[in-house]
């Protein structure tokens, strides 16, 4: 079911065990990652909001000045808005269920921003082709959160060096971080999907 509520267009599907919070990449919407999520974990609940920023008419989570150059003021504002939505929506729609973030590209960056800003602490997170969204002045307590980063060695959008800086920041915040390096660019591979499935099976 897709609807506008609590400030965001979003799709919610009830389920059991955990709720997968899906954060799409640039140009996609709340429906984009649902088939992937269902292939990975059929019975989980799904909460999938749509980013409210626009990039040449395409939804994304926050503004940018160019590839890899983010509007940090807008990122901070949009992060607070999304954190408020998640707090309300999760308490209303999936109370008591553990949460796992699943984000791709711009959505993975937003998930990382929420965690590094101390605005959201999911039980686990899968960050597909992410980069560090900002350099935190201080680190939150992410102890107990398991995180998988799936990075491409030849990614020209989310470059390996930016993924490594994100890995370091999340580890320094206390998270349990695994990183998978694929012989790939920005697109996902079968190796990535298998690694995510294994991670979710253990998380």
Image (spheres, grey):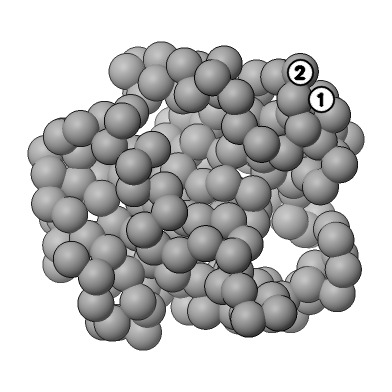
Depth check: give the residue in front, 19 or 33: 33
Residue at 50 percent of width and 56 percent of height: 24
The residue labelled by disc 1 is 153
Q: Is residue 87 above or below residue 183?
A: below
Q: Position of residue 45 (x, y in %)?
A: 19, 46
- Give the quarter of the image for residue 181: top right
Can you see residue 122? no
Question: In which quadrant of the rendered view does residue 135 lie?
Answer: bottom right
**Dots 2, 1 in contact, CB < 8 A:** yes
Relative to 135, 91 lies left or right: left
Q: Is residue 30 left or right of residue 180?
A: left
Residue 125's x, y, as percent? 47, 38
Looking at the figure, which quarter contains the N terminus? bottom left
- Mark found first going from the N terminus, 2 or 1: 1
Determine the secondary structure under disc 1.
loop
Looking at the image, residue 144 lies above or below residue 75: above
Quadrant containing the C terminus is top left
Q: What is the x, y in percent for residue 69?
A: 86, 65
Mark 1 neighbour class, 10 Å CA radius: few under 14, some 14 to 19, many 20 or more: some
Badge 2 local density, few (<14 within 10 Å), some, or many (20+)? few
Q: Residue at x 36, y 58 (%)?
A: 31
Residue 82's mark?
A: none
The residue at 72%/39% (across/down) is 186
The label on residue 183 is 2
| Residue 37 appears in view | yes
Q: Looking at the rendering, which quadrant does residue 123 occupy?
A: top left
């Amino acid at each position: 079911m897709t609807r506008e509520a609590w400030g965001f267009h979003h799709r919610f599907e009830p389920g059991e065990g955990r709720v997968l919070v899906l954060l799409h990449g640039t140009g996609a919407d709340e429906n984009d990652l649902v088939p992937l999520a269902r292939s990975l974990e059929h019975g989980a609940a799904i909460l999938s909001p749509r980013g409210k920023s626009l990039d040449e008419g395409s939804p994304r989570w926050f503004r940018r000045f160019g590839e890899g150059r983010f509007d940090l003021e807008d990122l901070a504002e949009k992060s607070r808005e999304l954190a408020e939505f998640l707090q309300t929506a999760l308490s209303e729609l999936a109370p008591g269920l553990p949460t796992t973030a699943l984000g791709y590209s711009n959505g993975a960056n937003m998930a990382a921003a929420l965690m590094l800003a101390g605005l959201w602490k999911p039980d686990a997170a899968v960050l597909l082709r992410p980069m560090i969204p900002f350099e935190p002045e201080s680190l939150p307590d992410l102890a107990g959160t398991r995180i998988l980063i799936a990075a491409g060695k030849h990614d020209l959008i989310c470059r390996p060096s930016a993924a490594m800086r994100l890995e370091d920041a999340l580890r320094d915040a206390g998270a349990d971080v695994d990183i998978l390096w694929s012989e790939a660019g920005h697109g996902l591979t079968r190796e990535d999907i298998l690694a995510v499935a294994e991670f979710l099976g253990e998380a």
